């Protein structure tokens, strides 16, 4: 379910920035696809934080953590599993 929500949000942001309805594989590196500009990436990060109730540290805003749908799912899952300080 999380995977679908994240993919749908990425595609909705991409569709809002251009005319065509894009497609996206879960392992595609989003910045390399050109689907999202920097403002849309920030909007996605804010959405991830609010939607899943997590805080994404600036140091974690990397391709390894947030570059694909797959890595976002893994990152959010880890963030949700962290004990609250």
Image (cartoon, rainbow, N blue to C red):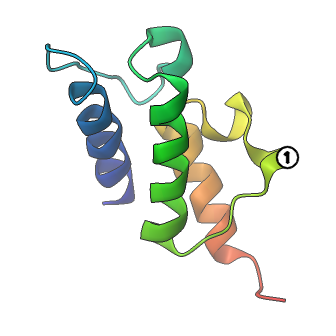
Q: Picture coordinates of residue 74 (x, y %)? A: 60, 51
Task: Classify 10 Å Cα crowding around label 1: few (below 14), some (14-19), many (20 and above).
Answer: few
Q: Residue at x 14, y 20 (%)?
A: 21
Q: Picture coordinates of residue 39 (x, y %)? A: 50, 33
Q: Is residue 29 visible?
A: no
8 to the left or right of 36: left
On screen, residue 78 above or below 61: below
Q: Quadrant of residue 78?
A: bottom right
Tell which of 36 and 25 is nearer to you: 36
Which residue is outermost to the front?
Answer: 39
Q: Residue at x 76, y 87 (%)?
A: 84
Q: Residue at x 23, y 17 (%)?
A: 18
Q: Quadrant of the N terminus?
A: bottom left
Tell which of 66 and 12 is nearer to you: 12
Q: Residue at x 44, y 11 (%)?
A: 34
Q: Quadrant of residue 42?
A: top right
Q: Quadrant of the C terminus?
A: bottom right
Which residue is outermost to the bottom?
Answer: 85
33 to the left or right of 42: left
User: How many callouts does the rendering have?
Assistant: 1
Q: Picture coordinates of residue 31 (x, y %)? A: 54, 18
Tell which of 77 and 36 is nearer to you: 36
Q: Picture coordinates of residue 61 (x, y %)? A: 73, 42
On screen, residue 78 above or below 25: below
Q: Is residue 1 visible?
A: yes
Task: Tell me the SS state at disc 1.
Answer: helix
Q: Which residue is mark 1?
A: 59
On screen, residue 28 above or below 53: above
């Amino acid at each position: 379910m999380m995977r679908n929500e994240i993919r749908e949000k990425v595609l909705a942001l991409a569709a809002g920035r251009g005319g065509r309805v894009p497609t996206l594989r879960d392992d595609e590196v989003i910045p390399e696809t050109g689907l999202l500009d920097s403002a849309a990436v920030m909007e996605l990060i804010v959405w991830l934080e609010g939607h899943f109730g997590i805080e994404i540290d600036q140091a974690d805003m990397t391709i390894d953590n947030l570059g694909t749908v797959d890595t976002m799912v893994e990152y959010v899952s880890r963030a949700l599993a962290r004990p609250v300080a």
